[in-house]
Amino acid sequence: MKKIRFIIFTLIILVAMFTFIKGTFACDVTIISEKNEVYVGEEISVTIERVKTHKTCVLPIEETEIQITNGEIVKEGDWVTGTKDTKEIVIKFNEPGTQIIKVIRDCPKGGLMVWTKEFNVLAVDTTQNLIEDQSNSQNSNTQPYENSIENQKNDLSNNLKPSEENSKDDLSKELEKYLFNPQTLLYIILIILSLIFVSLKFYKLRFFTLLFSLIVLGFYFGGCLCPISYIGKLFSVQFLSITFYIFLSLIIFISIVTLFKGRVFCGWVCPHGAIQEFIYKVKTNKFQKIEKYLKYLKYFILIFVVFLSFIYSQNYFCEIYPFKVLYNFSGTGLILIFALIILFFSIFIYRPFCRFICPFGAYLGLISKLGEKLHLRKANITSSCIKCKKCSKECNANSIYEESDCYKIDTKECFVCGDCETSCPKNK
């Protein structure tokens, strides 16, 4: 009964906190073009899509600024609002080099946010025209032609210098947007702290990291930046761009932690796992051993989502998880129903979304298993098992299995909660 009162009290505090936070806001913008390599003066169509990821957007969509480096907007349509706000524009670039479209929103809540897309702009080949002019001139000689070519090279070199400066400026903005923003930094800090706690076996501190993650990364920031989207983002951004390398680095960072210590992110940091875990603390009869077949479902979902993201170059990871609806108190009917179903079953099943549906959890499970195969981490609970079965009884994730001489951890399904180690009489 005390745990139920605690959960109700915590939820009331979270709702009250969220209600009195004025203008909670964030959004995601995608810049879509028919091609990324164009010629100087060539007109191309570009679609700008904006998706709200928070409860309220305090900056009107019409105040979105669009900038074209060394180019111009030839034709501009109006914003069409809906589930995705879209705007169609036709642009052209006036100089060769690496040119950029910038979409800028200076939000009172989220601060300055900039989305960019790079284009490789090629110079129009004028060599043939120069040759014809030289042959038609009675007083022509090769020196003017050579000078013209040399001048053209110098002009191209001079045009590229501002683009190099723009690239440095874009690098700092991309780093600020995707890496040095509060949400990502909090994720990184929590992962590092959790790694320290796991290494020191301070397992009781897991409750506080999860509660902090749920309150701040979940309800305050709306869960709008979640590593579940990092893999999907690799397919929706330009290949080998600055943004691509940023997301790849974040995936590698979490993967390295998982290789050595298991699914620390899932068990200690993820706000979506936290809300399910807290709901599971409600005292009632639980469904046991339900994961026998369902635990493989998430791997099929991982393959399916990665396939769709690869084929359509869209971030489908964010489309399938329901928790933003809970954090923002808004969303479509189907997603809301899905969220309520997840919460309901969380009362009877330990972390149902994490264990049976989450594609990022499936990915980290495979990485954790790889770490075991490479002998980077052990699956043994203790070196002198007496088969008392206490570890198996304490494991809510049912990730403990029996072998002939001992009990071991299924590292793919383990959330590194430490309950098996702390319950083992041989570890005391």
Image: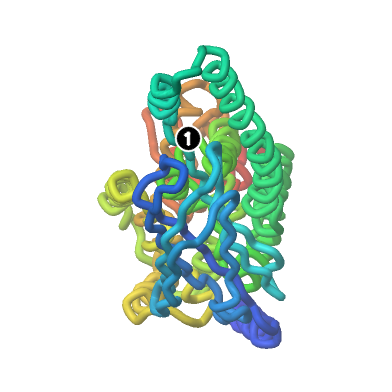
Q: Tell me if residue 407 can be seen.
A: no
- Of 28 and 196, nearer the camera is 28
Residue 262 point in image, percent of width and height: 54, 38
Question: Vertically, is 405 above or below 91?
Answer: above
Q: Secondary structure at mark 1?
A: loop
Look at 47% across and 75% down and name the residue there: 325
Percent position (x, y) of residue 105? Answer: 63, 68
Tag count = 1
For the point 61% across and 25% down, which residue is it?
151
| Residue found at the very far top of the displayed protein | 142
**Above or below 223: residue 428:** above
- Quarter of the view holding residue 76: bottom left
Query: Going by the image, does 268 lie left or right of 199?
Result: left
Residue placed at 28% from the left, 54% from the top?
Answer: 294
Q: Is residue 307 visible?
A: yes
- Residue 182's place in the image compared with 172, above or below, is below
Question: Which quadrant: the C terminus?
Answer: top right
The amino acid type, in three-letter code, at marker 1 is Ala
Q: Which residue is mark 1?
A: 123
Q: Is residue 135 depicted above or below 335 in this figure?
A: above
Residue that appears at 66% across and 82% down: 23
Quarter holding residue 373: top left
Figure quadrant of the N terminus: bottom right
* Horizontal side of residue 309 vs 103, given as left or right: left
- Front residue of this view, candidates 378 and 300: 300
Give the colour scheme shown: rainbow
Q: Can you give x and y, in whole percent of width and height, for residue 421 in the image? A: 60, 42
Residue 379 versus residue 148: which sits nearer the camera?
148
Check disc 1: other Cα within 10 Å, few if <14, some if 14-19, many if 20+: some
Image x and y of residue 51, in percent: 47, 69
